[in-house]
Amino acid sequence: MPPIITIALSKGRIYDDTLPLLAQAGLAPALDPERSRKLIVPTNREDVRVVIVRATDVPTYVQFGGADLGVAGKDVLDEHGGDGLYQPVDLDIARCRMVVAARADFDYAQAVAERRRLRAATKFERIAREHFARKGLHVDMIKLYGSMELAPLTGLADVIVDLVDTGNTLKANNLVAVEEISQVSARLIVNPAALRLKRETLRPLIDQLALAAQRAREARLAAAALPAGGDRG
Ligand code: PRT
Ligand code: MG
């Protein structure tokens, strides 16, 4: 009997974007976690199961061996610190950008030029602190757990540090991205001890997921290179 492999995923975009990669590695969850309350999801392979955890808890599960593998955004990994995690593959999924955003009428460039003391609201405290420290800015950090966009509108903060994908959320709240901190995508993370102990099962799975991600990336880049409409015919 091969060892059981546990993969930690979060519901929503991480799960949705990981599913096609799992499929290419021959793995199919036996139920849809969006429609079930089960937190342990069996797969078509007897020796592989998926556990459903909060996005920010994925690194913790993998670090302490509650899961052998996981998929987590670079934002989550940067906040976690990455201790005790092997990060072999950028899966290039759940892509977005980490930005500084402010009200459209707030002159961020001016505030930076004057080295004004700023108030920043974010749930990404570590990322924000390191970013402003690199710029040599004094920033008072206000930790929030959600709805960051509200902070500049209510006077709680001058700026926010948040993830942006389409930009629709910022636009709907009259905010603009004033600085890009980083490009974000989700990474495969692995428990190093599990990799040693279960290498014969884990290594091929990691390689298959890496190959699937590579193929998806190439397909995306090829599609982006096509003229608008996507049809050369
Ligand atoms: O939602 P929950 O509090 O349970 O946890 P979570 O927010 O950590 O998880 P989830 O599932 O929302 O996000 C998981 C991962 O997806 C994140 O860690 C990112 O790496 C990645 N990702 C990709 C995003 C986005 N795109 C994204 N757009 N995570 C969040 N957003 C949010 C953003 O914070 C903002 O509120 O979507 C809003 C902006 O979207 P646009 O399209 O309007 O710009
Ligand atoms: Mg969310």
Image (tube, grey):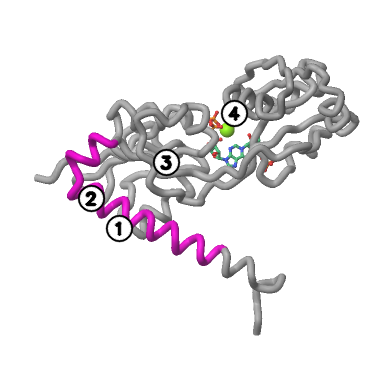
Image point (59%, 28%), residue name: 127
Image point (66%, 32%), residue name: 162
Q: Earlier in the sequence, mark 2 or mark 4?
A: 2
Q: Which residue is mark 4?
A: 127
Q: Are marks 1 and 4 in contact (CB under 8 Å)?
A: no
Q: What label sits on residue 26 in the rendered view? A: 1
Image point (38%, 60%), residue name: 211
Task: Classify residue 109 by image quadrant.
Answer: top right
**Which of label 2 and label 4 is nearer to you?**
4
Q: Which residue is mark 2?
A: 45
Mark 1 Cα-neighbour bin, 10 Å: few <14, some 14–19, many ≥20 = some
Q: Helix, strand, or loop for circle 2?
A: loop
Q: Earlier in the sequence, mark 1 or mark 4?
A: 1
Q: Nearer the viewer, residue 134 or 145?
A: 134
Q: Earlier in the sequence, mark 3 or mark 1?
A: 1
Picture layout, residue 123 above or below residue 223: above
Q: Which residue is mark 3?
A: 71
